[in-house]
Image: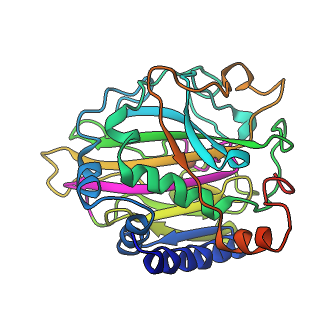
Amino acid sequence: MNDATFNDAMSEIMEIRERYARERSVFIEGDRMVEILKALGASAEDLEKIKLVSDDLPKDPTLPFRESKNGRFCFDFDNSRAYRLEFQPFALSAEEDFVRHDSGQTRIFEEIGNDLQLNSALQALLVFKSLIFRGLSTDRRPKLDYDSAEWICTLFNLRTISTPDLQGEPALEGVHSDGVDHTMTTFLGSRNMTADSAVTFLHAMEEKNGTRWNGTDPGLALGRCQHRHFLDTMIVVDHERKHSLSPVSAVDKRLPATRDMLIFFTRKPVMEGHISHPYDSLGAHAGLPMAVDLPLPLEEKILVAAGAPAAGGVER
Ligand code: FE
């Protein structure tokens, strides 16, 4: 990768970062993401491979129309790296604006393996996300430790499946938040999915949790987007915007329709009294190690060069 390409991509990322800071959500077209990820180290081969990584996912622990895996990563800005965290069960509660039949339940997902975590496109997505949210102030969630240097990123690899018997719902819970600070969603692919499937709607925090996507208050609507092409990506400040999604429908109703996504939840470590407190280890994964260097955002580089402390030191 030559420096000019990297610097061009970094300038583009800084534009996206500014838009995210201003608007509190941003959608980036897949074609643009391909170029950005290449500049951040994604190989052409891995960009092809990641399209197929959802093909043999195991069944989801609680949702019959979904296949899933997850894995935890730490953004350690003090040491300029992200690394794989050890396995922990997963929980989301109604207190975090997540109201579903399995709210508050401890869920055990199968673990993301090396096929995904060692893929250079995935690693570039982690780097990209870090460059977008690092140093940004957002409304704080209760019981998260904003003095901590680390951020915890839980990555989900999901396939939502609609069959003639069962409609696949990317967000069965209706209007909700993900219980984190920054959510990033990246589209990997779909099969037999209608063009009007899986639209994401953003809502003001006043919208009532659990409302179906088509029953929401238009006065509280803050935008919509749709992931249709490879690497279409949305990022949202999760404690400032709620979201909902329409279901996955099949073009040929006799056959299954699928939608494959990567979801990156990122938040500060939790404090005592939070539902995830027993499951929030910062220990590295012994069996599935992975680490990737995190470059500084361009504007931070300029500040650091001028003698200011890097963000993360000041605004965690
Ligand atoms: Fe969500």
- Does the magenta portion include 175? yes
In percent of width and height, residue 128 lies at 53, 61
**Quick check: can you spot residue 42?**
yes
Residue 164, horizontal then vertical, whole percent: 20, 41
Q: Is residue 261 above or below residue 13?
A: above
Left or right: 292 as drawn, with respect to 305:
left
In the image, residue 199 sits, relative to residue 158, either above or below, namely below
Q: Name the image quarter holding the N terminus.
A: bottom left
Q: Position of residue 195 (x, y in %)?
A: 29, 66
Q: Quadrant of residue 192?
A: bottom left
Q: Residue 142 is drawn in which quadrant? A: top right
Left or right: where 170 falls relative to 182: left
Residue stretch rendered in magenta on the structure: 173-194
The image position of residue 287, as x and y in percent, is 45, 20
Q: Nearer the viewer, residue 212 or 127?
A: 127
Between 246 and 71, which is closer to the camera in this rendering? 71
